[in-house]
Amino acid sequence: MVDLAAVYSREIDGKTLTLVPSGWTYDRTFVLYDRQTNSLWYPYKEGLMGIQGVYYKRWLPILDSDDTRWQNWQEKHPHTRIME
């Protein structure tokens, strides 16, 4: 199985960042930026590393997450609601 998604913390220095696609790729991987400082972020195994800007060489750690099917999730978490 190939990891096609990851979950990262958005908190750094007591702030919560809004991460969005930059429109750029490097080595066939999307580069993100945060709307607060326009710092660029690149995904590594350990998390997102700031590759340019205010948070250069700083890390946003990867968070534990589960890949699952909706039916399996719903069985484990029957009160989950979908936002429309």
Image (cartoon, rainbow, N blue to C red):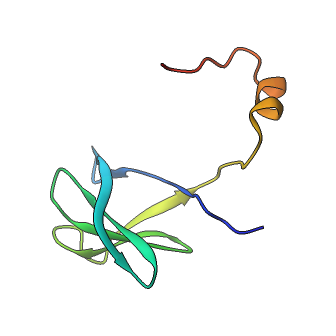
Q: Residue at position x 65%, y 49% from top? A: 65
Across and down, in percent, residue 33 comes to: 27, 61
Across and down, in percent, residue 6 comes to: 56, 58
Q: Residue at position x 77%, y 25% from top? A: 74
Q: Residue at position x 28%, y 65% from top? A: 23
In this picture, is 63 found above or below 77? Answer: below
Q: Residue furthest bottom?
A: 27
In this picture, is 22 found above or below 50? Answer: above
Which residue is at the front of the view, 70 or 18?
Answer: 70
Image-based side of 40 in relation to 80, left or right: left
Which residue is at the front of the view, 5 or 44?
Answer: 5
Q: Residue furthest top?
A: 79
Q: Residue at position x 26%, y 69% from top? A: 40
Which residue is at the front of the view, 58 or 75?
Answer: 75
Image-based side of 7 in relation to 37, left or right: right
**Res. 1 image quadrant:** bottom right
Q: How many marks?
A: 0
Across and down, in percent, residue 45 comes to: 56, 74
Image-based side of 31 in relation to 38, left or right: right
